[in-house]
Image (cartoon, rainbow, N blue to C red):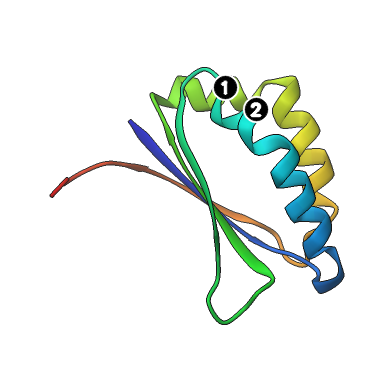
Amino acid sequence: MLVRIVRMTFKEDCIDDFLKLFQKTSMKIRHFTGCTHLELLREYHHENIFITYSYWESEEALNNYRDSELFKEVWSNTKVLFAEKPVAFSFKRFVVV
């Protein structure tokens, strides 16, 4: 399993646009082959910072999504809303308690 975390900082006036886009596309992403979990987190003290937290069956599954038309549509509509460059991390689950 691969855990993907993407930290995104949005322009203050673009937050509603992002939330509408996430609402519109999140179920498609959740049902994309290989995605087993997707959630959106909001920074506690900085309301324009969001994190997507997702589980993928494998790196190949994530890459298939990143090569898909769905990703291209979502990302092209999301990146124009950024105030800063996003930061992404990929992890392996190491210890589960």
How many callouts does the rendering have? 2
Q: Residue shown at 85%/52% (left/top)?
A: 80
Q: Residue furthest left?
A: 97
**Which amino acid is tagged 2?**
Lys
Percent x, y of residue 79: 79, 50
Neighbourhood count class around disc 2 (C-alpha, 10 Å): few under 14, some 14–19, many 20 upward: some
Closer to the camera in the image, 64 or 23 = 23
Q: Residue shown at 39%/24% (left/top)?
A: 58
Residue 44 left/right relative to 55: right
Up the image or down, 24 lies above or below 11; here it is: above
**Circle 1 sits in a helix, a strand or a loop, which is it?**
loop
Q: Residue shown at 47%/21% (left/top)?
A: 34
Residue 7 bears which disc, if any?
A: none
Q: Residue furthest bottom?
A: 45
Residue 28 bears which disc, if any?
A: 2
Asked if labels 2 and 1 touch by Cβ distance under 8 angstroms, the answer is: yes
Residue 59 left/right relative to 75: left
Work out how far the residue at label 1 is from the one at label 2, CA to CA, in angstroms: 6 Å
**Which amino acid is tagged 1?**
Phe
Residue 32 found in image quarter: top right
Up the image or down, 1 lies above or below 84; here it is: above
**Circle 2 sits in a helix, a strand or a loop, which is it?**
helix
Neighbourhood count class around disc 1 (C-alpha, 10 Å): few under 14, some 14–19, many 20 upward: some
Residue 11 found in image quarter: bottom right
Percent x, y of residue 24: 75, 39
Quadrant position of the N terminus in the picture: top left
Percent x, y of residue 31: 56, 24
Residue 32 bears which disc, if any?
A: 1
Percent x, y of residue 22: 70, 45
